[in-house]
Image (spheres, rainbow, N blue to C red):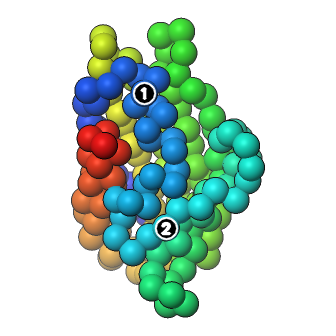
Amino acid sequence: MALFTIERSSPHPVDETWRRLTQWQRHGAHVPLSEIAVRTGGPTRVGSVVVARTGLGRAGFDDPMEVVRWEPPGGGRPGLCRLEKRGSVVLGWAEIEVWPSGQRSRVVWREEARVARLPRVFDAPTAWAGRLVFGRVLRGLLEE
């Protein structure tokens, strides 16, 4: 599997950074040819399902993810969200950590991803593409 990590400084306090990064539908505005939907009602919690639809029309695929860990920041401790990928095309997990840093915050995005039936020789290019795409997502979400 392709493991990658992205770290960014956020100009926003930890609570605002967390809010921006966990409003799932906003992610779709920063990933080409993608839309994000939350399949479960109410606020995000363990068991919430987020689906990224990538493609044009019927030529595409769904990337369903389930929130398996949900710990919003508070009391000086960081926030942590872990999503497990539950689809048949994209496998793996993603973690988003948001750490307080004075009046700002620090984001650590870790992801282990693999495209099903793609040989392991493609892990390095997959990690490179993941860093590129999700680096843009983070930048966009934090700058809006």
In the drawing, what numbered circle is on residue 16?
1
Q: In the image, what residue type sits under mark 1?
A: Glu
Judge from the rendering whether residue 61 lies leftward or rightward of residue 1; answer left or right.
right
Answer with left or right where residue 20 lies relative to residue 40. left
Q: Amino acid at mark 2?
A: Glu
Q: Residue at x 53, y 9 (%)?
A: 75
Residue 14: x and y, percent? 41, 22
Q: Position of residue 127 (x, y in %)?
A: 31, 62
Work out which quarter of the rendered image holds the C terminus and state it.
Answer: top left
Q: Is residue 6 visible?
A: no
Residue 97 point in image, percent of width and height: 44, 33
Task: Say which residue appears at 26% left-offset and 36% top-offset.
Answer: 8
Quadrant for the N terminus, please: bottom left
Which residue is farthest front?
144
Looking at the picture, does residue 69 appear above or below residue 29?
Answer: above
Q: Residues within 10 Å of mark 2 (few under 14, many from 20)?
A: some
Which residue in the structure is indicated by mark 2? 35
Mark 1 or mark 2, earlier in chain: 1
Q: Identify the residue at image location x=55%, y=90%.
A: 58
The percent position of residue 45, horizontal first and vertical second, equals 69, 39
Identify which residue, 130 or 41, lies in the foreground. Answer: 41
Pick the residue in front: 98 or 22. 22
Task: Reply above or below: 97 against 30.
Answer: above
Question: Residue at left 58%, top 49%?
Answer: 83
Whether residue 84 is visible: yes
Per the model, the C-alpha gap separating discs 1 and 2 is 23 Å
Q: Dot 1: what SS?
A: helix
Q: Residue 79 has which mark?
A: none
Position of residue 132 relative to residue 135, above or below, is below
